[in-house]
Amino acid sequence: AQSVTQPDIHITVSEGASLELRCNYSYGATPYLFWYVQSPGQGLQLLLKYFSGDTLVQGIKGFEAEFKRSQSSFNLRKPSVHWSDAAEYFCAVGAMDSSYKLIFGSGTRLLVRP
Amino acid sequence: NAGVMQNPRHLVRRRGQEARLRCSPMKGHSHVYWYRQLPEEGLKFMVYLQKENIIDESGMPKERFSAEFPKEGPSILRIQQVVRGDSAAYFCASSPYNDRRTGELFFGEGSRLTVL
């Protein structure tokens, strides 16, 4: 069965520092991968997605993610974090059954120190 | 172009009452997904519907929960005889088509159910 693991429950970084959020997936074929962000009390907003092609994907708000098949990973990065980036981040993989639903990881909460 | 609209945003029910959560997908979207987010947890898939059809309900609890997406009107998630463990945020997402090449789901802001 497909699954997504986000090993870090919380991460705290200083404003201006770089950020990397980890995501590992379990799936045999080429996965469809997504990163979503959720601000407190809000819905989810898509940051970026990977289907095929270039393994380095650019998203909104200065985020990028790199697909590494050998490591079954799709880590999210940002070179310089802003205080407004504090939120919950979810990695997801697209199910390969007929529903094409998304299977989410448990999320990583990002705290930003001033 | 309005996004996915969910209402109510907040709902309080006593144990044993019924909860009805509504979701209007984005204009032109005919695929609706419901997810549940328990406190401090990720989103868990519940059900996938197209107009007048339940396609995948593998994530729905076997009892008390039901969902529909009628030909006209919003999709409705119904929880009968609520218990405290039903307290959660329920998110609806929609998609214009069932295509793995896009796969993106557009989420509403959620309905937060509190069971007293």
Image: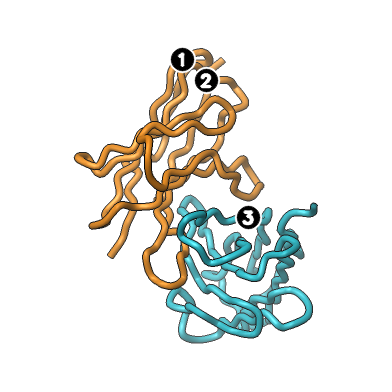
Residue A75 vs residue A39, the one in the foreground: A75
Q: Report the label total.
A: 3
Q: Chain of mark 3?
A: B
Q: Residue at x 56, y 81 (%)?
A: B65
Residues behind callouts 1 and 3 on a single chain? no
Q: Colour of chain A?
A: orange
Label located before the other in sequence (1 or 2): 1
Instruction: Label 2, secondary structure: give it.
Output: loop
Residue A50 vs residue A41, the one in the foreground: A50
Residues behind callouts 1 and 2 on a single chain? yes
Q: Residues within 10 Å of mark 2 (few under 14, many from 20)?
A: many
The chain assigned the colour cyan in the figure is: B
Please say if A91 is above or below A99: above
Q: Are marks 1 and 2 in contact (CB under 8 Å)?
A: yes
Query: Circle 3 is placed at which residue position?
Result: B107
Q: Chain of mark 1?
A: A
Q: Position of residue A92 (x, y in %)?
A: 43, 51
Q: Residue at x 54, y 25 (%)?
A: A62
Query: Circle 1 is placed at which residue position?
Result: A17
Amino acid residing under circle 1: Ala
In the picture provided, is B44 more to the left or to the right than B67?
A: left
As measured in the structure, the alpha-carbon distance from the residue carrying label 1 to the one carrying label 2 is 6 Å
Please say if B40 is above or below B51: above
In the picture provided, is A41 more to the left or to the right than A53?
A: right
Q: Position of residue B99 (x, y in %)?
A: 50, 63
Query: Circle 2 is placed at which residue position?
Result: A81
As measured in the structure, the alpha-carbon distance from the residue carrying label 2 to the one carrying label 3 is 25 Å
Q: Quadrant of the C terminus of chain A?
A: top right
Q: Position of residue B64 (x, y in %)?
A: 56, 85
Amino acid residing under circle 3: Phe
